[in-house]
Image (cartoon, rainbow, N blue to C red):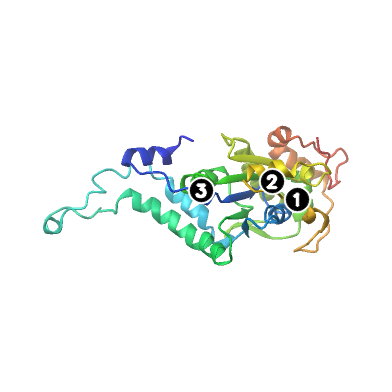
Amino acid sequence: MDNHLTRFDDRFGIPACETGSAPVFLLSAGWRSGSTLLQRLLGSSGELLMWGEPYGRAGLIPAMTRASFCLREEWPNEMHCRVPDAPERQEAWIANMYPEPAALKASFRAQLDTLFAQPAAARGHQRWGIKEVRLQAMDARFLRWIYPDARFVFLLRSPWAAWSSAKGIPFYEQWPTRKVETVQAFAAHWNKLALSFMQWPDDSGMIVRYEDLIRPGFNLQALADHCQLSHIDPTPLQHKIRGLRKEPSPLSPQEVSFIQQVCGTACEVAGYRTPVVPGVGRPAVG
């Protein structure tokens, strides 16, 4: 996967991070899309501890992703990373004197290992993962840089059905300013994430539709193989566990139309059709 991060590595001769942990990142296009069900399924073999939206409001991974954006051909340069010997420092220009670039990359990995891998290992799990509803493909590219053997599962649900379930519940894309409580904000969030998932360039990522996941005959073993798990126990499909006891809300014709305007292209690619009857919260699925 060629991007500014791999070019940064090449420029400074930074080796790839070690492999072996193969974390699984379950990224959902927003809330109320079945991500917790899929989280339970992926953890059902006992081989993986999958954290659920860990410290999501803190925005830790998006902050790291944004921090990595500046690692380009022109910055930092070799002068930033030159550390003069002790006798020289008194007379040298040291206003911009950085630790070596490899230390920056290692610090990203160290924070994520400390937060996720070590607590999982303390509970007897050598493999771990996280499920999130705010991260997009650019965050996944950052995570792939830090964990070269990571596996990604991208979850979609019809935006009409997801909004029908989410309507009336306040969520935060970024706390405390970017609140998602209107159809406009929800549709924009869904569309941004879904389109980014669809552009993932290689087979380390797998797109799963919630509507397919809950249908009889869904190939759970293919999902297990993708995540490098021996198997997935289908039992969680039979047990509905609700964190929020809320029935879906009817959608107005205006909401149905607005979601179509914003999400139409991504929905067409994903096989979702606009509800035939305006106001119905359960859209047709291709």
Front residue of this view, candidates 283 and 218: 218
Q: Amino acid at mark 1?
A: Trp
Q: Which residue is mark 1?
A: 163
Placement of 225 over or under 239, stated as above or below: above
Q: Amino acid at mark 2?
A: Ala
Q: Nearer the viewer, mark 2 or mark 3?
A: 3
**Which residue is drawn at the image coordinates 34% and 49% (left, top)?**
102
Per the rendering, the mark at residue 249 is: none
Q: Is residue 197 left or right of residue 218?
A: left
Front residue of this view, candidates 79 and 265: 79
Disc 2/disc 1 C-alpha distance (Å): 8 Å
Q: Which residue is mark 2?
A: 187
User: How many residues crowd around disc 1 within 10 Å: few (fewer than 14), some, or many (20 or more)?
Assistant: many
* Position in image of residue 187 (x %, y %): 69, 46
Disc 2/disc 3 C-alpha distance (Å): 25 Å
Mark 1 vs 3, N-terminal side: 3
User: How many residues crowd around disc 2 within 10 Å: few (fewer than 14), some, or many (20 or more)?
Assistant: many
**Which residue is drawn at the image coordinates 23% and 55% (left, top)?**
95
Q: Is residue 200 left or right of residue 224?
A: left
Quadrant containing the C terminus in the rendered view: top right
* Position in image of residue 69 (x %, y %): 43, 45
Placement of 14 over or under 98, stated as above or below: above
Helix, strand or loop status at disc 1? helix
- Residue 73 shows in this picture: no
Mark 2 vs 3, N-terminal side: 3
Q: Which residue is mark 3?
A: 143
